[in-house]
Image (spheres, grey):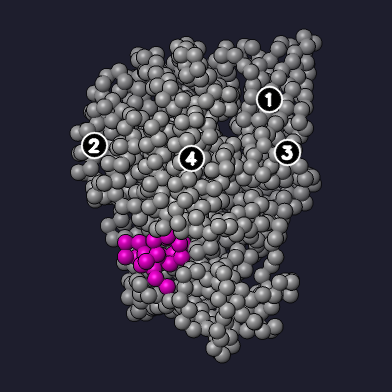
Amino acid sequence: MRDAAPKTIYLKDYTPFGFLIDGVELTFRLSPGATRVLSKIRFRPNPDATDTRFFLHGEDLTLISAAVDGRPVTPRIVEGGIELDAPDAPFTWEAEVEIDPKGNTALEGLYMSNGMYCTQCEAEGFRKITFYPDRPDVMATFKVRIEGDEPVMLSNGNPGASGPGFAEWHDPWPKPAYLFALVAGDLVNHPDTFTTMSGKEVELNIWVRPGDEGKCAFGMDALKRSMKWDEDVYGREYDLDIFNIVAVDDFNMGAMENKGLNVFNSSCVLASPETSTDMNFERIEAIIAHEYFHNWTGNRITCRDWFQLCLKEGLTVFRDQQFTSDMRSAPVKRIDDVLSLRARQFPEDNGPLSHPVRPESFQEINNFYTATVYEKGAEVIGMLKRLVGDEGYAKALDLYFDRHDGDAATIEDWLQVFEDATGRDLTQFKRWYAQSGTPRVTVREAWDDKGTFTLHLSQHTKPTPGQDQKLPQVIPVAVGLLNPNGDEVVPTRMLELTEAEQSFTFDGLSARPIPSVLRGFSAPVILEQEIDNDRRAFLLAHDTDPFNRWEAGRDLARDTLISMIREGAAPNPAYLEGLRAVMRDDTLDAAYRALMLGQPTQSELAGILFDTGTTPDPEAIHVASEALRDAKAQALSDLLPGLYDKNQVDGPYSPDADSAGKRSLANAALSLLTRLDGGAAAQAQYDSADNMTLQLAALGALLDAGKGDAALTAFEDQWRHDRLVMDKWFSLQIVYTKPDDVAATTERLTRHADFDMKNPNRFRAVFGALAMSHAGFHYASGAGYDLLADWLIRLDPLNPQTTARMCSAFQTWTRYDDSRQAHAKAALERIAGQASLSRDTTEMVSRILKG
Ligand code: B3K
Ligand code: ZN
């Protein structure tokens, strides 16, 4: 490993920086291999600081010259930057450094993507651009001058002077360096305008490479709807004259909220019916909204330090989830969010990478942009809103924006506004930020024949790394009661579970009710409720809460799969019957019915088996999952053709929720139908498809049926010029390969002429698909583990961030049998044993190895 004892940073050690900044001026002289960055920064001593060391971060910089108040100085080179004996009075620091954007394959700091200059500074990338106090609590206004031959040269804020060979930008809002951005290249724009609530006209642009102009309209519309929604729902107005979005092909994540200049992975902004699926459209809409919403929750109010990351991310995810619910179907959105929480966050929270929503230590902060910080962070805010009510939430948010605008704030500040606005004591609630692990809530029922029904709730959280003892958390448990005839007798009530065990009574009932517990998934917990299949079938038929109605069907599918795996049982007829009833019910939303046709993922089943004392066998899980799909196809055989036909959408493609819902139901039906007709309908759909949603679903169905070879070749011929579509082509064939062949198929694809390990989208398309193929990745021979390890070892020197992120594929390794564990451990140890392994990957692998 690179560093025998990598440095750990602790939340408790926070101290303010010794200086404040009155203004930053930067000049960039662009050149691919030798860009010069000139900085002029006015510092003054910070009266609130005790540590007066003048330390500036810097990494991979060649210092050309430095001066204080115009006098040349030679700073001391120290670990991670430079130090100087600074004057005890205001002074101006000037420096010139040289950097190498072209050689920057880590895609952090200033780098090049397809000949275009771009930046990524969050979390700590600005220090690769110039010497600077690169921490979020140091905020400053920036003036930027870009010199170069690029046709388009952009930075944050409002445009200033420009002319041949230069462009100037001025951002009047003080910001931390992680929000700095610069983009320069041969770009074309898709322009529009938005008039804000106070009547100010804002210029909007989506900048793309020539040829992609036709893929911007949807993103632009999503941006305008986001701007309007944030005004209507949160009262937040945009605050610059211009808002720019740029699409970049090589990007380590989805997008970045740089002030006034959002940079997007092209996969998260470019959309066209021919090249993007309905899911792509929905994701693009959500990410555009997310980055835009950061303008207030993240930029105007930022984080004091990186431990407070959930302050901006949890809140902004919560806001983008609200936006999508408003734009589309709220129940469908809730189910989607819970599916992704269970698929990504629960395994994290219940394995070696478990950490609190607000971590207390880290070695590399980039490793903490996790499902826990983001998605559980959003759930925590949802619970807070449920506990204080909609009005309390609105008052608290108004106070938050009033009180903290311009601040670098903390979770304490956030909770304080809720306490001040609502009078509620949140001392116990704060444990949601500090305790890791998913609480398990057990439900027992009692009925006394005198009309009183009692729910006994208890909570328990298993120990997690570094936290042996857990204290009870406040858990909002939404409960409704149904009469045996299916009518709702007690509408949803929010029970507050605050103790380890607590009972809640409902009086005056005429018959023993059937409870519907944790409606709307009111808390991110695992519900342990002993209920039989009849009860689940009853809830599937009658629950008035759409989430719990879906959940009842899901639980039936889960239980039947578990007994198929454990006991070789046949699929449960009650589940199949319930599914038939739902598929016959045309009053239900198509997207909702499509979700009902789904079943728990193989990885989720492995987690459930492990939790209940059975070592999961990936092959057996795979076989049972396939058998249940076959059984569904048989049980619904008479309904599938009708479902498929009735949900065809006529007319030109539109990505709206209704049309997308119909396509998702038709495609779900197609995938089952293919098990009956051998692929005839899928081939017909492939041949006639005029949009990517239909084309890709048909290709998937054909591959699943073992009849996809011709279509796969045709698809490649049709789309080889389009990187984003080819990413789908790479992934899909791994997804539909039989487990024993997954590693070999993946390896073969790495030899394809278009496989480019330096492009994170392509690397993820291939190796993300390998990791997602449960039975293939965890194949008994260990070939899946070995192949991923080989490639992570190759990628680490080039791109530590993407390497470290993909290590999490190994996070569940201790669930499996001894032989698999031995293979996984050997693969992990092989990664860990590399000389000069990055800090990012070192931290991830050592946490995962601790088990
Ligand atoms: N804030 C960025 C993520 C930065 C990740 C740095 N490794 C995008 C977002 O959450 O909106
Ligand atoms: Zn974010």
User: Between tags 4 and 2, which lies in front?
Assistant: 4
Residue type pointed to by label 2: Leu
The mark that comes first in sequence, 4 or 2, is: 2
Q: Look at mark 4 in the image and give the residue it sits on.
A: 825
> From what the image shows, is residue 736 above or below residue 835?
above
Residue type pointed to by label 3: Gln
Distance CA(mark 1)–CA(mark 4):
34 Å
Left or right of 1? Residue 454 is: right
- Whether tag 2 and tag 3 are in contact, CB under 8 A, the answer is no
The quadrant of the picture occupied by the C terminus is top right
Q: Which region of the structure is painted magenta?
A: 99-120
Q: Which label belongs to residue 442? A: 1
Mark 4 secondary-structure assignment: helix
Ligand 1 within 8 angstroms of badge 2 C-beta = no
Q: Which label belongs to residue 712? A: 2
Q: Position of residue 156 (x, y in %)?
A: 49, 68
Distance CA(mark 2)–CA(mark 1):
48 Å
The mark that comes first in sequence, 4 or 3, is: 3
Q: Is residue 324 visible?
A: yes
The mark that comes first in sequence, 1 or 4, is: 1
What residue is shown at x 59% (from left), y 21% (from top)?
A: 543
